[in-house]
Image (cartoon, rainbow, N blue to C red):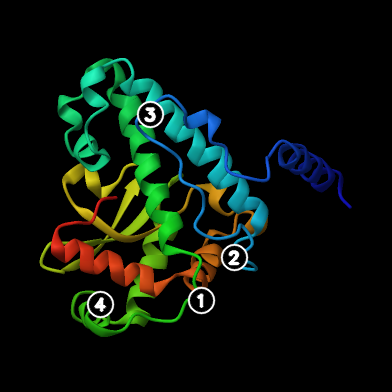
Amino acid sequence: MPHIHRRTLLATLAVAALVPARPVRAQTAGGPFTLDPLPYPVTQNEPHIDAETMTLHHDRHHAAYVANLNAAVAKHGELAGRPLPDLLAGLASVPEDVRAAVRNNGGGHANHTMFWQIMGGKGGEAGGELRAAIDRDLGGVARLQEDFNSAGGRVFGSGWVFVTVSRDGRLALTTRPNQDTPLMDGQRVLLGNDVWEHAYYLKYRNRRPDYLKAWWNVLDWDAITQRYTAAKAGTLGV
């Protein structure tokens, strides 16, 4: 084994040894925002997304966003009562001393909450009204996947690629840097993929296109269809 690979493996194992078997809840205590447990086992998305990545991503990265968001809003009590979509859409009114923390960590919390909800499935394709909307607005399933993967591959550094959904059911493809989210523009997200390296590096290394392609195999189209229905009803949150 080459020396560089041995160092990488040892570092990975050292981090993994620190990860608890269940989601970290203590990091999110004492604030209005909480880290929900994953809605399925960490092995659910194997082999496309490995269990170790799922554990680190949820229990460490997402938990840190929640803890940091709670710490930020604790400095200004009026922020704690705002629903997360409203907080993110109204960043201009957030006090300047915590605005960047709310943007980064609130966006991270919203993005990841959506992310866990739409996975855990077997891939395939949407049906019914959502399939018709994909055909109408995004050129069909195959074109959506091609354009989505291309857009995700072009994100410089860290960020997200999304499909947004309007109140009248219209779909659009967009990207955002870092933990920014369309919620900051008053939009709603149908689905989105995390292209930060922590989402894929243990399994895919620097092969982001391979990760983007494999990700479609773990989507739960029933859950995504429920998000579409909620968006049209005006009840979709994050």
In this picture, is 138 found above or below 210?
below
Badge 4 crowding class, 10 Å Cα cut-off, few under 14, some 14 to 19, many 20 or more, is many
Q: Secondary structure at mark 3?
A: helix
Q: Earlier in the sequence, mark 3 or mark 4?
A: 3
Q: CA distance from mark 2 to mark 1?
A: 10 Å
Asked if residue 97 lies left or right of residue 70, the reply is: left
Going by the numbered disc 4, the residue's amino acid type is Leu
The amino acid pointed to by label 2 is Gln
Where residue 10 sits, quadrant-wise, is top right
Q: Nearer the viewer, residue 118 or 178?
A: 118
Tell whether label 3 touches label 2 (CB within 8 Å): no
Q: Position of residue 222 (x, y in %)?
A: 37, 74
Q: Which residue is at a point 61% across and 48% down the rendered structure image?
A: 55
Q: Circles 1 and 4: CB distance less than 8 Å?
A: no
Gap in Å between the C-alphas at discs 2 and 3?
28 Å
| Residue beneath disc 1 | 122
**Would you place residue 144 above or below residue 30 in this image?**
below
Residue 224, quarter of the rendered image? bottom left
Residue topped by disc 3: 69
Residue bearing the label numbered 2: 44
**SS type, badge 2:** loop
Report the residue marked by disc 4: 130
Q: Which class describes the residues within 10 Å of circle 2: few (<14), some (14-19), or many (20+)? A: some
Do callouts 3 and 4 mark residues in contact (Cβ within 8 Å)?
Answer: no
Q: Earlier in the sequence, mark 1 or mark 3?
A: 3
Identify the residue shown where x is 39% and y is 81%. Answer: 125
